[in-house]
Image (cartoon, coloured by chain):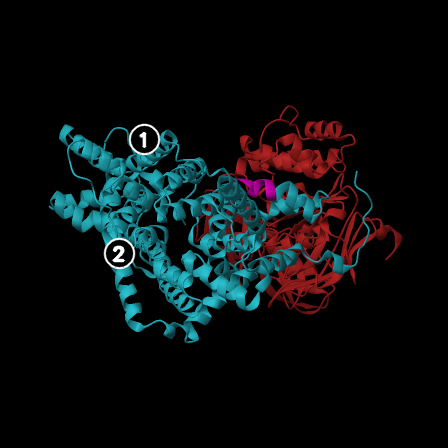
Amino acid sequence: MNSSADHRPLAAHALCKSFDATVALDDFNLEVESGSLLTVLGPSGVGKTTALRILAGFEMPDSGTVRVNGQTVNGPGIFVPPERRQVGMVFQDYALFPHLNVARNVAYGLDAHHRDHRVSRVLEMVGLAGFEKRMPHELSAGQQQRVALARALAPGPQVILADEPFSNLDAALRKRLRAEVRSILREARTTTIMVTHDQEEALAVSDQLALMNEGRVVQTGPPDHVYRYPATSWVAEFLGDADFFDAHAKGGRITTPFGTFPTTRSGKVKVMVRPESVTVFPHAQGVAVVVHREFFGHDQLLSVKLPGKITLRARCWPQPQLAPGDRVAVSVDGIHIFDEPRTAPTPPESPAPGAPIPQRVVIPPLG
Amino acid sequence: MMGVAHPVPRLRALPPNTWWWVLAGVVMLPAAAPLGALAYGLVSGVVTTVPIARLLELAANTGALGAAVTSTSLFIGGASAWLVSRTNLPGKKLATVLILTPFAVPSFVGALALLGATGADGILSAAWVWMGGDIIHYPSGFWAAWLVLTLISVPLVHLAVAPAVRSLNPTLEEAARGLGAGRLKVFWTVTLPQLRPSLTAGALLVGLYTLSDFGAVSLLRYDTFTRAIYLEYAGRVDRRPALGLAAVLAAVAVLLVWLERSTRTRGVWFTARPRRTSPPVRLGLGGKILGWGFLGTLVTVSLLVPVAVLIAWVMRGLISGVLVNQPWAELGRSMWVALLTALVAAVVVAPVAMVTARFRNRWAGLLEGGAWALYGVPHIAVGMAMIVFTLWLARPFYQTLMLLVGVYVVMFLPQILGPSRDSLGRVSPSMEEASRSLGKSPFQTFMGITLPLMAPGLLSGAALVFLTTLRELPATLLLRPAGFETLAIRVWSATGEGFYTQGALAGLLLLLIAALPLAIVTRHELIR
């Protein structure tokens, strides 16, 4: 490893872990930059929590290494127990000690030296100054969560790991709290790895996103980058709405019912279109027919059928004049092209984004 | 801030769970000794040293007593539970406490009270003679044992039935009434079937209790298995007949325990949790007088008269100067051995509770089975088995305090395992992990997080063990070091020799100490 990687707050390399017959982690790689918030995002049961628990030292990997600030904590013949990793943890159920008050919960990981000063500083940071003497059961769910965060922050760990930290909160509180937690972490300049299955949450709070599927990280990068340039069709589909169809690339071009796009590939490919890049407008001779309309108030989702058994969805402003059966013209802002097979894994170090088409291609109506 | 992480060899970081398993296994090993001896007694042909006619006689006697005690206490306890839980009878809280307190009366103290009340110089006899009657003769045999054991068993039934009566689903009864059934028919066809699981559980508990009792039947001279075992042990050099009888008794008890546990899970059919509780049955003035008459008689006979008789004997002894040999040394010994047992049990139960609360696999099941294995096995059978075991295989432990405490702990472990596991269930593993990630070692985590959170359960469990140890008679009788007289032994031997004055003070002391932890104990379950 080079020297810059050596001083990453946390780096995991080639972690593997199986429980009996089920493979939880299969060549799991992850690195986090100092001071950033990295979110491991993936559907339930892909090994996110297992990965986090290995990083924290609660589980032993079958193979692979983990380094905290350059120190190997998991490796061949090496296991540093959780209490000596300098890794803080925020649990899904907060795991506040019910027999200790707020101040003693926060002070639990501190030496006697400077304890009181540190406790009041951290509590102030999470906005709970004055709550020192309260018992955990006397706090609201949001307050409990901030105590859990304060407790993890207090000893000044290299990294804080957070396992689905917002999943126990109701929707309204979750939105408010995640912005709050984000700013607390930023103020504390802490490196954080968070695990979640909630796409919106991950996109909203993270500096870096690590998409995880079937025991490994499929793609990493800033949220908008990953959203715009998904490495695989699985990522595209998991991170937002996407429609796919098969097409044939020949002579540097892909021809679709809604236009021709340049490409470097040739042969059979998979084309992905996001609903927000599709625009439809009524046209008596349009190529497409509206087949379904789902109305959300702030926008609507129109499903349109194109020649060649292609169905696309278009997210657009309510257009009450459009109803199933209407003919429309379709324009698409850009497409992504994936090689077959659909779930070809791409190494996270060199994400191979689909070919984004920057220019707007307007398809002239037939006739 | 934290120090720098140092890698350590993997071996030292043996996952803490493994240590719990090892500890729990070591701790449960001693339970195998009495079980092994009893199993040996059952399969080795030792049983054949007892004549078959004698076995049948004992079985008939024990069965008759069990049936009589169970049916009467079921009737009385069911009625008291209904009166207290379903009617508007005033003073129900006081009544509950008074009805349950006789559970703290050991059967040998009950027998002492009965013997001390009757006969030529009995307290009740004296009162009766003073009123112009004749003396009341000593009761003995079946009816005496039946009376004492029934009165002590009523609280058991009351405890088992009262919660079920409270949670009776009123809509079922209303539906039956709506379908045209009268009150009586509703009671027989709807109410009683709903209570059947709890009545069955109560009946089996009482049956088990009667089967195991040694104190009352030995003092009142009714020939059951327990008395026969002791007589064989005391009267012969050959230990085989005693071991054979103990093995048979243990097998019957295990069968009863198995029945009790299987009815507990399978006897309960689908019941929707009632949205509301039944309105209390409104008793008229006559009903209230009848109800209080019933409960008053019960409390008088089962609690007030026995205590009064004991006090009267102590007073009589003090006035006449006969009470010279006061049992303070016995009191000290009883307290000391009970405290030691409670302490050892609290230490020993920790790993077993950790493992059985945290893991659900075959090994955890085996451990739990080990902890429960001796539950319900009559103490005299355990005592007999341990005598045989130590004489044959562990001679240095024979009649030592260490052996006595060890046997107590193994027998009473379920009493402390239940509550400690309940409180451990409220400690989520993530709390321990949080502590680890905050820089605390497994040991520091256990001391700082797990133990404090487990403490309430450990404490009430230890109180239960203390109470049970204090009143334990048969195993103590068989296994105690020579000359080690406890309060229970004192009561039993003094009563057996007719020195009621000597027994009364020890019995009163025993009741007093037993009443103290009862306050803690009633908060949890009295019996599992």
Q: As drawn, is A23 to the left or to the right of A75? A: left
Disc 2: which residue: B65
Question: What colour has chain B?
Answer: cyan
Q: Is residue B108 magenta?
A: no
Q: Position of residue A309 (x, y in %)?
A: 52, 64
Q: As drawn, is A279 to the left or to the right of B241? A: right
Disc 1: which residue: B94
Main SS, magenta region, reads helix
Q: Is residue B455 magenta?
A: yes
> In this orientation, does residue A186 appear?
yes
Q: Position of residue B229 (x, y in %)?
A: 38, 62
Mark 2 nearby-residue class (10 Å; few <14, some 14–19, many ≥20): many
Say which residue appears at 62% left-offset and 57% top-offset.
B23
Amino acid tagged 2: Leu
The magenta-colored residue range is B451-456
Furthest-front residue in view? B321
